[in-house]
Amino acid sequence: MPAKSLLDGLKVVEFTHMVMGPAAGLILADLGAEVIKVEPVGGDKTRRLRGSGAGYFPMYNRNKKSLAVDLKSEEGRAIALDLIKEADVFVENFRPGALDKLGFGYEQLKELNPKLIYCSEKGFLDGPYRHRTALDEVAQMMGGLAYMTGPPGRPLRAGASVIDVAGGMFGAIAVLAALRQRDLSGVGTHVSSSLFETSVFLVGQHMAQYAVTGSPAAPMPARISAWAVYDVFDTKDGEKVFVGVVSDSQWTTFCEAFGLDEWAADESLRENNQRVARRDEIIPRLKKLFAEHAQSDLMAKLEELGLPFAPIKRPEDLFDDPHLTESGGLLEMTIPDGGEIALPALPLAIEGERPALRFDPPEIGQNTVEILRSLGRDEDTIKGLEDRGIIDTPKRHRRAHAAE
């Protein structure tokens, strides 16, 4: 079954912005669900972010439809409620209580549509922190990830919105589990995922290390590695390569291939823990050895040996990565301002097929008219809603923008 048709027939209504909520919707959309992004007249403010936020909208909103409507108006709320009445899933990432005030809280929508799976993407799950405002960075700082990422005394957030994206993933997983339960029970439910608890889950391995050994995990730049050779090395041509030797058999292969005969024969280096104890001896010699090789030659040799290695790439280098370009790992699309771009596909395959692009990231209100027609609104009603600014369409938005 093609990946794009796995969730065919599933209707998702999405009240989201920024990254976490849209990421949950993206996963469902890429797997074939019809995902309708409900955004305000004038569009989701995420569309207008600059700097590090400039890529949020195109990355997390492909394969979705856009309905732009004023939810603070009676007519706008009626449109959204009619849409939700027919939906299987509702995804939101607003502050606790915000949607209840507008009439879109879980208890309210459960009355409207008892089969609805209501997915809340929040900063915190229920507990003392529930009403705090959270961001990816907040979660990384208080969830231990920033402490583990930076050097001692200098907590550093990870270089991508990993908690937002992982929180969206957990939300999508919860939705799929709830849909399975609905198949058995016939009724929907409320599922939630959160930034803080996602960060805590990701540092669970370090919590477990402390629980098992009684010693706290050091930040990654100061950690005691689990393996003697597990580091980044400079090469002759000024490039860098990560090299890992993570088993006793790999150690033997490595030493033989690089002429380290005395190490291969040294019984005191046979086992990994013995080598870790002598890491201060091993690493300086390998730094000198690898500095005699060009990056390409070193990587070719390591690949032939079947040892773990990686060049150090920047995000912009990945557009030309041969594995991604040849395997369907990048999806070519047109973004709302008309530019062409290639962005990462979901990192999975179904029967060898990568989830495909069905729709470009939508313009503001791109599908508003189509959706209103499907809900039984006639042309005069639609025109009246547009004229009064209750709904937005690409044509109306461009006129309004030109008038500014």
Image (cartoon, helix red, strand yellow):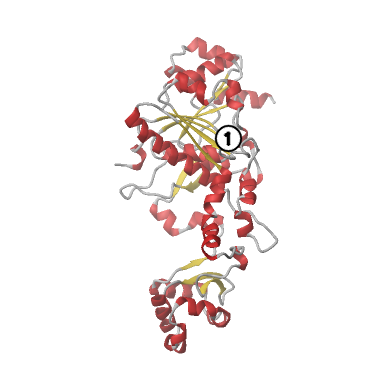
Q: Position of residue 180 (x, y in %)?
A: 35, 35
| Residue 182 placement: quadrant | top left
Quarter-of-image position of residue 31: top left
Q: Nearer the viewer, residue 284 or 267?
A: 267
According to the picture, the residue beneath numbered tag 1 turns out to be 17
Residue occupying image coordinates x 62% and y 23%: 399
- Identify the image quadrant of the N terminus: top left
**Picture mark count:** 1
**88 lies above or below 81:** below
Residue 340's x, y, as percent? 52, 43
State the residue at coordinates (55%, 14%). 75
The structure residue drawn at horizontal position 50% and vertical position 54%, both measured from the top left corner, is 319
Compared with residue 204, is residue 21 higher up or lower down, i.e. above or below? above
Give the left or right position of residue 152, taking residue 26 as reference: right
The quadrant the C terminus occupies is: top right
When the figure is inspected, residue 49 is found, relative to residue 259, above or below; the finding is: above
Question: Which residue is the extreme one toward the top?
Answer: 380
Dot 1 amino acid type: His
Quick check: can you spot residue 83?
no
**Residue at disc 1, secondary structure:** loop
x, y percent for residue 82:
47, 18
Residue 104 is situated, as x and y percent measured from the top left of the image, at 54, 23
Does 8 sit above or below residue 152? Answer: above
**Nearest to the observer: residue 12 or residue 181:** 181
Question: Is residue 222 in sight in this rendering?
Answer: yes
